[in-house]
Amino acid sequence: MKFTSTRGTAPATSLSDAIAAGLAPDGGLYVPDALPRLASDAFTDCIKLPDVAARLLAPFFAGDALAPELDSICAEAFTFPAPLRALATPRDSVLELFHGPTAAFKDFGARFLAACMRRIIRPAMRPLTILVATSGDTGAAVAAAFHGRPEFRVVILYPDGRVSKRQAHQLGCFGGNVSALRVAGSFDDCQSMVKQAFADMPLRAWLSLSSANSISLGRLLPQMAYYAHAALSHQRTHATDLNFVVPTGNLGNALACVLARAIGLPIGRIALATNANRTLPDFFAGAEYAPRASIATLANAMDVGAPSNFERLRWLYPDAAQLRRDFPVQWVDDEAIRATIRERYARHGEVFCPHTACAIRALENLRADGADGDWCAVATAHPAKFEAIVEPLIGRHVDVPPALAQLLARPSHADPLANDYSALRAFLESSASEHV
Ligand SMILES: *Cc1c(COP(=O)(O)O)cnc(C)c1O
């Protein structure tokens, strides 16, 4: 399979090259040149998540240098489960994507990307610096996935004071080949500094640089696997399609669900839930698409005003009217996030992180509007990652999962960084010379 750009003017390229490049040279996002067709019967002998992943991804890897490695890449990346759990409300469930090392779904994509990059990287590119701007969860997942691999360095930029305390601890606890920089600015400022580094040709002449953001095919493609796995096992036990509500920021996780359905997996409706950042809900309600600055909410990993994967959604749905008809989209403000966390615990003993709570609230609204069938809200992070928000609302301690506890037990350090590109450049220069 070859990959082309959503903007249509970059040459078709191999999967390995598309993963190594990140963004297509015409500024678009890489998409498959044709969608394979894989219905349920293609998976009859696949039960476990890594096996489903390898079967699902085989057509995308066909003809690429990584194809013979696909089974081992999946075995390396999918080392923790993605269980479906029933909720107290009838025919509702959650897909728990937070059982990885950093307790958020981004571990799946980051680990898969690392497994691919390790096999792609040429000696001349070493050490490759992975530069990431993070609103909280991406940075830790990428750090965990690349930590201890000497052919890579990871440099993380995060907005100081705007991530949860445990998120900040995670970002700074790796050390070694991972540096955490706390920037005196917003997530958008961090992202803009990263973009400036990529555009800095004199810097790139001596520093090999790569990104790991949510537009990377190496993160997007593997995320289809847990939707496929959940929908297939639901179909086996209930003989019906599973509908999903996906809490959404940059649309990476939701797009993986949409792609899995387009390929033929037994997925019914897909609803999107955002926080008070309303770029997507406004578009789906009929307005022009209008990216804007993000606003800070309790679901901070979804504080996105310009969803980076929107271009891929438009590529799949060139007809805006059909796109708007196909997807129920709701936004959930902080007050509703708080109420959902409080009420689901009081009524049912269920505990959710603020992002998952957006999906739960959207599902409750869909049910109130008469939605039938089996619905699954996607649980993107463990509530213990956001204990400062969740614990006061439910009035009890949230147990910390073992993987997260291990990271929290390590010392953590982040260097302060001015909100100014020259400060980042100076850091990259000094740390590169240290590294040699
Ligand atoms: C990143 C993240 C999201 C949003 O995912 P997108 O792929 O950006 O839409 C939702 N919840 C959590 C916990 C996240 O870390």
Image (cartoon, rainbow, N blue to C red):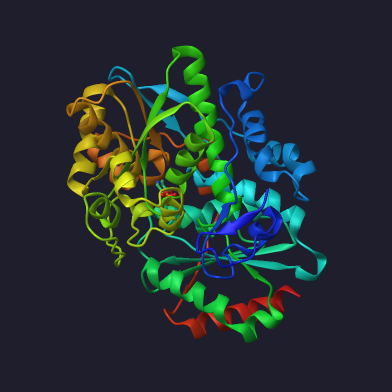
x and y percentages locating residue 63 in the rendered image: 76, 47
Q: Residue at x 56, y 27 (%)?
A: 39
Residue 122: percent from left, percent from top: 79, 64
Quarter of the image with the C terminus is bottom right
Is residue 282 visible to us here?
yes
Residue plotted at (46% across, 61% down): 134
Classify residue 153 as left or right of residue 68. Answer: left
Residue located 75% across and 69% down the image? 125
71 is higher (above) or lower (below) than 409: above
Q: Is residue 47 left or right of residue 63?
A: left
Q: Please say whether residue 101 is visible from this viewpoint.
A: no
230 vs 128, nearest the viewer: 230
- Residue at (32, 44) in percent of width and height: 322
In the displayed structure, does residue 154 sit left or right of residue 134?
Answer: right
Residue 350 screen position, x and y as percent? 31, 27
Q: Residue furthest right?
A: 123
Give the answer, above or below, for where 85 lies relative to 275.
Answer: above
Between residue 359 and residue 66, name the one nearer to us: 66
Asked if residue 145 is positioned above or below residue 420 in the image, the reply reads above
| Total numbered circles | 0
Q: Quadrant of residue 288?
A: bottom left
**Toward the viewer: 338 or 399?**
338
